[in-house]
Structure formats: C-alpha cells, structure tokens
C-alpha cells in the first residue's frame, strides 16, 4: 500500500506542472491581447488628432476666403484667366464630362495663411472660390409680383481643404457665401 501512495504523489506533481504551464500560456495570451488593444487605441487617438488638425486647417482657409469675399478683397472677374488665383466662373453641369472643380487634377488652389506651425500641418491650407451667379436671398423672395431690390444677391461657393500630406488626414469643406 505504501508503494501506491508514492506513485500517486509523483503523478500529481506532473499534473500541477502541466496546469501551471497552461495557466501561464493563458495569462500570456491575455497580456498580448491587451497590448494589441492598447496599441490600436493609441493609433485611433493619433488619427483622430490628425483629422482634427486637418479640419481646423481647412476651416481656417474657408473662413479666410469668406472674410476676403465679405471685405471685397477677392473681386472678379471670375473668368478662366483668374483660375491661377483660385477664382472660377459659374460651373456648367450640363457640359459633357462635367467634373466639379475641386475634383479636377489641374485645379489651382489659392493658398491661405497657415495658423498652426506644428509638423502635422506643414503646408498651408488652400481654397477656391466659384461664382455661382445671382440667387434670391432669402429663397422665394422673387416669387411675388414685385421683386425687392435686395432680393437678388450674388452667391459664391467656397471650397477649402487642408494641406494634402502623404499618409495624413485631409479634410475638404465647402460653403455657400452671400456677401
């Protein structure tokens, strides 16, 4: 009977070693999973910060163009000759192979002043201004028998984007502006 007990004890020590190794592997897998989750969250936070910087950059360009339009600093004519200044004539969507100005590769964007000087926003944001013609403001004011003189106003479409940097977020914003 004594020999049997000795054999059982020896056998139990082997099982406890195997169980310890299995628990150690499980703990290692949980640690690796938590590290991967932490790295993913860090990348997500960095991308969110990068996108926010790009958004602020594009918005500052948009506001600068609106301010210049409101102060009559940007003045026409909005012709093909002024495209080099980021000023574009009224678009014609009925034209064959029509592509929006901001989607064309040969579009010349006007540089806006850069508000941030950190490395993420190197390069100035840019904007373009399109003359959209004369529109009623407020909408419907031209429906009566007499049209008030202040009813019809010139409308501009301003498109701005953050500096296009390789591997970084880019934001494009657009607004209709009535000076």
Image (cartoon, rainbow, N blue to C red):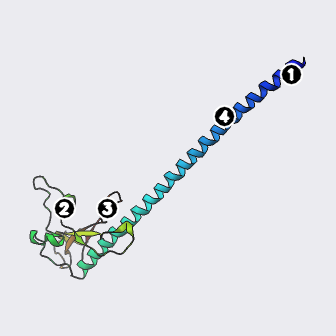
- Residue 25: x %, y % from top left: 63, 38
**Circle 1 residues within 10 Å: few <14, some 14–19, many ≥20:** few
Q: Mark 3 sits on what residue?
A: 165
Closer mark to the observer between disc 4 and disc 1: 1
Circle 3 sits in a helix, a strand or a loop, which is it? Answer: loop
Compared with 28, 154 (above or below) is below
Q: Tag 1 or tag 3, which sits nearer the N-term?
A: 1
Left or right of 22? Residue 167 is left
Q: Do the CB atoms of the residues marked 2 and 1 lie less than 8 Å apart?
A: no
Q: Tag 2 or tag 4, which sits nearer the N-term?
A: 4
Circle 4 sits in a helix, a strand or a loop, which is it? Answer: helix
Tag on residue 22? Answer: 4
- Residue 102: x %, y % from top left: 22, 61
**Circle 3 residues within 10 Å: few <14, some 14–19, many ≥20:** few
Q: Mark 1 sits on what residue?
A: 5
Q: Residue at x 51, y 52 (%)?
A: 39
Q: Do the CB atoms of the residues marked 3 and 4 lie less than 8 Å apart?
A: no
Give whichever of 94, 169 is nearer the camera: 169
Circle 1 sits in a helix, a strand or a loop, which is it? Answer: helix
Closer mark to the observer between disc 3 and disc 2: 3
Give whichever of 138, 27 is nearer the camera: 27
Tag on residue 101? Answer: 2
Q: CA distance from mark 4 to mark 1?
A: 26 Å
Circle 2 sits in a helix, a strand or a loop, which is it? Answer: helix
Q: Do the CB atoms of the residues marked 4 and 1 lie less than 8 Å apart?
A: no
Closer mark to the observer between disc 3 and disc 4: 4
**Circle 4 residues within 10 Å: few <14, some 14–19, many ≥20:** few
């Amino acid at each position: 009977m004594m020999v049997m007990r000795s054999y059982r004890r020896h056998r139990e020590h082997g099982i406890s070693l195997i169980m310890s190794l299995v628990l150690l592997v499980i703990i290692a897998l949980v640690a690796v999973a938590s590290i991967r989750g932490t790295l993913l969250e860090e990348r997500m936070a960095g991308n969110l910060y990068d996108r926010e910087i790009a958004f602020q950059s594009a918005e500052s360009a948009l506001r600068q163009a609106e301010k210049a339009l409101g102060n009559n600093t940007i003045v026409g004519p909005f012709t093909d000759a002024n495209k080099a200044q980021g000023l574009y004539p009224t678009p014609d969507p009925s034209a064959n192979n029509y592509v929006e100005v901001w989607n064309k590769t040969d579009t010349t964007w006007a540089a806006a002043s850069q508000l941030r000087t950190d490395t993420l926003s190197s390069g100035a944001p840019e904007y373009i201004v399109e003359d959209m013609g004369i529109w009623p403001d407020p909408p419907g004011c031209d429906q009566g028998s007499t049209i008030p003189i202040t009813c019809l106003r010139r409308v501009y479409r301003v498109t701005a984007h953050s500096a296009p940097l390789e591997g970084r977020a880019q934001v494009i914003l657009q607004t209709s502006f009535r000076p």
